Image (cartoon, grey):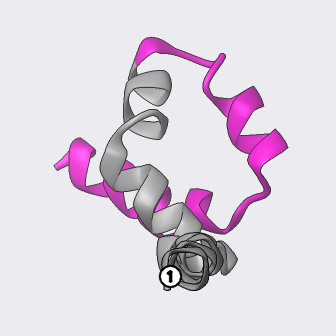
């Protein structure tokens, strides 16, 4: 039951924090570091902050297409 509460805090609160705050939170404990360093958290954080991978990589893809054609 304790893990569910922690997971809700991570999913609903920590994903909305700036990157600098996430870096400080990783220093609190091994559990925080493990959870905040996971691929799932990083993806959720990037989607909530507006830095989705689609927007990050689309200009590179467009440039590559224009150079090869």
Residue 54 or residue 59, whichever sits in front: 59
**Where does the image place residue 68, in percent across and percent down from the top left?**
49, 75
Residue 64 magenta-drawn?
no
Residue 14 magenta-drawn?
yes
**Where does the image place residue 33, in percent across and percent down from the top left?**
49, 23
- Residue at numbered disc 1: 65
Q: Residue at x 38, y 63 (%)?
A: 8
Q: Residue furthest left?
A: 1
28 in relation to 12, above or below:
above
Q: How many marks?
A: 1
**Where does the image place residue 51, in percent across and percent down from the top left?**
65, 72
Residue 64 or residue 52, whichever sits in front: 64
Q: Residue at x 67, y 32 (%)?
A: 25
* Left or right: residue 44 compared with residue 46: left
Which quarter of the picture shows residue 52?
bottom right
Q: What is the magenta range?
A: 1-30
* Left or right: residue 11 compared with residue 23: left
């Amino acid at each position: 039951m304790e893990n569910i509460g922690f997971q809700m805090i991570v999913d609903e609160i920590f994903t909305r924090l700036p990157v600098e705050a996430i870096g400080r939170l990783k220093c609190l404990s091994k559990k925080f570091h493990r959870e905040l360093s996971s691929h799932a958290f990083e993806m959720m954080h990037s989607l909530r902050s507006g830095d989705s991978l689609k927007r990050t990589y689309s200009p590179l893809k467009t440039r590559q297409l224009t150079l090869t054609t």
